[in-house]
Structures are given as C-alpha cells and as structure tokens.
Amino acid sequence: MQTKLILQLSLFGLVMAIGTVYVIPSAVEPFLWLPIFFVCAYVIARKCEGKYFLHGFLTSLVNCVWIVGVHVLLFDAYAARHEAEMAMMAQGPMATHPRLMMVLTGPLIGVVSGLVLGLFAFIAYKIVKKG
C-alpha cells in the first residue's frame, strides 16, 4: 500500500475543497473532478505495484476527509456561495444542523466517488500495463 501516494493525490481534494468554498461554483465542480480522477487513475496505474482499485478508493476517502473538513470549518463562507445547496439542506431532515448533515453525507459521497476512482484506476492499469 502506497500511503504517501494516496496522501499526495488526495491534495487534489484539499485544493478542490478550498476552491469550492471561495471560487468554484457547484455547476462547474463535476467537470473539474473528471480530469482529476483521470490524472489520479493514471498516476496510480503507473506508480503502484498492485491493488489499483484499493488505492483509488482510499484516495477518494481521504479526499472526502479534506472536503468535509474544509466545508465544515469554512461553513459560513461555503454557505454564502452555495445558496442552492443550503436551500436543499433546509428541506432535509437535519435542516437545523447543516454541518452535521455534511459530516454524515460526505462519507457516502466519498464511498461512491471512491468506487468510481477505484474503477478508473483499475481500468487505467489495464490500459497502461507497466512494462
């Protein structure tokens, strides 16, 4: 397991977390994640000696920690720039606890994105097939 590589690749998550608080609108965010996933998958395929899916999955889980942490810590700035998300949370079961809602739903999103990145990493390995 290449823990250092996972942590290094997860810095994309830290950058995106800060970016989504201050600069990146929600409508643009998915279009930025796709190339990040491609880059991460390629790097995992090139640098790892096995467990490609697991490396991708764990990278997304660490991304999730960065993203949830930053969004919770910088909640007021995040909420000010994400009115649609705040309105959606206001309709949910934890309307009075949006930070808690982020903490609870963030890992679910991390798992789903981990499945995607893990699959991308496995496919990238099949395409790259190190020599």
Image (tube, rainbow, N blue to C red):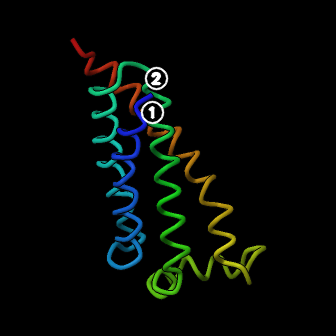
Near-viewer residue (106 or 29): 106
Left or right of 68, for residue 2: left
Query: From what the image shows, is residue 117 above or below residue 121?
Result: below
Which residue is rendered at x = 47% and y = 80% of the image? 78
Left or right of 18, for residue 42: left
Which residue is rendered at x = 53% and y = 81% of the image? 75
- The secondary element bearing badge 1 is classed as helix
Q: Position of residue 24 (x, y in %)?
A: 34, 72
- The secondary element bearing badge 2 is classed as loop
Left or right of 38, for residue 65: right
The mark total stands at 2
Residue closest to the far right: 93
Q: What residue type is labelled 2?
A: Lys
Residues packed near mark 2 inside 10 Å, few (<14), some (14 to 19) or many (20 plus): some
Q: Where is residue 48 in the image (x, y as percent from the top left)?
A: 34, 25
* Residue tagged 2: 51
Residue 55: image tag: 1
In what quadrant of the picture does the C terminus appear? top left
Near-viewer residue (52 or 92): 52
Q: Do the residues labelled 2 and 1 touch (CB within 8 Å)?
A: yes
Which residue is rendered at x = 50% and y = 40% of the image? 58
Residue closest to the far left: 131
Give the distance between the C-alpha atoms of the residues marked 2 and 1, in whole angstroms. 6 Å
Query: Hey, which quadrant is residue 126 in on the image?
Result: top left
Query: From what the image shows, is residue 54 above or below residue 97?
Result: above
Query: From what the image shows, is residue 65 above or below residue 130?
Result: below
